[in-house]
Image (cartoon, grey):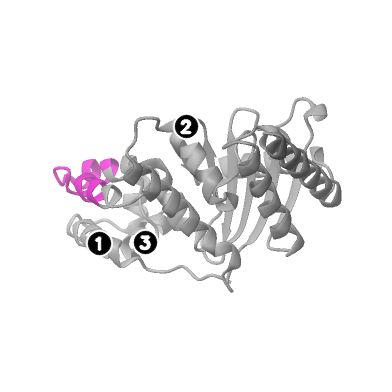
């Protein structure tokens, strides 16, 4: 299983945090209480294993009276990333996860996207972007998917809503390729995927995507995302509620075999449409 890894790019942040915390005479637990995270998380920040979100960095500045040094450091490190600021911590965590459970109601998850699908999604959200910007976003998304074939890959459980299979993102040919790609990953047992049919009606987590991540030596997290932002959640009570929502999604879905049949049928429909155009 994947081990937690120290990120050297964030090592300076952790060393600076430890220095200021000790100067203030606070233990990790005491500082955690002041910034509304656990003392264990403060320890992971100091080791460069986990990266604090911007709002946590701001609270650290307030607690330690540092004049904004931690906020500025986090902003600098975030700006170097190809990911949106709210997603950076998720991208960092997924390479350490031992299990990822994901639900997507409208768009194929990034870890499963093909180049043409990822490009279509990126251009749709950024119609005035330069080609360089689009290619950077697509490349970073495809780079993330490498974890699925890594020797230390996490267990990957996916629940898709049928909407994701029938919306022609990128056109019929691109969708046929995308669905073929997912079907092959399923047959190669890189993931376990089920589909919630439209006929199922209402379901849990109808207001956005949901991702759960488990780790070998860290508490589990949940991540929710809507069109314009995402939220990483690590409060144990909230994560437990998210896990229950995911359980409800799974029991609403078709069996893995039925889901694969549905994906293959949708791919064939798109292939037929592509031949007619």
Q: Position of residue 29 (x, y in %)?
A: 37, 55
| Label 1 – label 2 distance at C-alpha | 43 Å
In this figure, which residue is indicated by the disc labeled 1? 18
Q: Earlier in the sequence, mark 1 or mark 2?
A: 1
Number of callouts: 3
Q: Position of residue 46 (x, y in %)?
A: 31, 62
Label 3 or label 2, whichever lies nearer to me, is 2
In this figure, which residue is indicated by the disc labeled 3? 43
Secondary structure under the numbered disc 3 in the rendered image: helix
Residue density around tag 1, few if under 14, some if 14–19, many if 20 or more, within 10 Å: many
The numbered mark at residue 186 is: none
Secondary structure under the numbered disc 1 in the rendered image: helix
Task: Report if residue 17 is visible in the image.
Answer: yes
Q: Earlier in the sequence, mark 1 or mark 3?
A: 1
Q: Do tag 3 and tag 2 residues touch (Cβ < 8 Å)?
A: no
In this figure, which residue is indicated by the disc labeled 2? 124
Q: Is residue 51 left or right of residue 26?
A: right
Report the residue at 53% width, 63% height from top.
Answer: 146
Q: Position of residue 123 (x, y in %)?
A: 44, 36
- Assign the magenta stretch its main secondary structure: helix
The quarter of the picture where residue 205 lies is top right
127 within the magenta span = no
Identify whether 215 is placed above or below 2: above
Report the residue at 34% width, 35% height from top.
Answer: 129
Secondary structure under the numbered disc 2 in the rendered image: helix
Give the magenta part as a residue range.
58-76
Report the residue at 21% width, 51% height from top.
Answer: 73
């Amino acid at each position: 299983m994947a081990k937690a890894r120290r990120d050297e790019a964030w090592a300076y942040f952790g060393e600076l945090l430890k220095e200021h915390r000790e100067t203030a005479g606070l233990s990790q637990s005491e500082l955690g209480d002041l910034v509304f995270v656990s003392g264990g998380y403060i320890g992971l920040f100091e080791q460069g294993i986990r990266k604090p979100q911007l709002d946590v960095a701001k609270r650290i500045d307030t607690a330690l009276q540092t004049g904004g040094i931690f906020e500025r450091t986090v902003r600098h490190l975030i700006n170097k990333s190809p990911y949106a600021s709210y997603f950076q911590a998720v991208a960092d965590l997924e390479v350490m996860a031992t299990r990822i459970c994901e639900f997507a109601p409208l768009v194929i998850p990034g870890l499963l996207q093909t180049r043409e699908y990822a490009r279509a999604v990126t251009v749709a959200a950024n119609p005035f972007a330069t080609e360089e910007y689009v290619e950077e976003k697509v490349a970073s998304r495809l780079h993330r998917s490498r974890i699925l074939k890594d020797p230390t890959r996490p267990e990957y459980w996916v629940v898709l809503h049928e909407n994701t299979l029938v919306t022609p993102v990128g056109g019929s040919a691109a969708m046929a390729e995308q669905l073929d790609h997912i079907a092959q990953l399923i047959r190669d047992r890189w993931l376990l995927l089920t589909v919630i049919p439209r006929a199922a009606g209402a379901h849990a987590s109808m207001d956005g995507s949901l991702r759960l991540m488990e780790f070998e030596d860290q508490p589990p997290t949940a991540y929710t995302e809507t069109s314009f932002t995402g939220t990483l959640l690590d409060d144990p009570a909230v994560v437990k509620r998210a896990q229950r929502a995911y359980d409800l999604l799974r029991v609403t879905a078709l069996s893995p075999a039925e889901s694969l049949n549905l994906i293959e049928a949708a791919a064939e429909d798109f292939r037929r449409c592509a031949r007619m155009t």
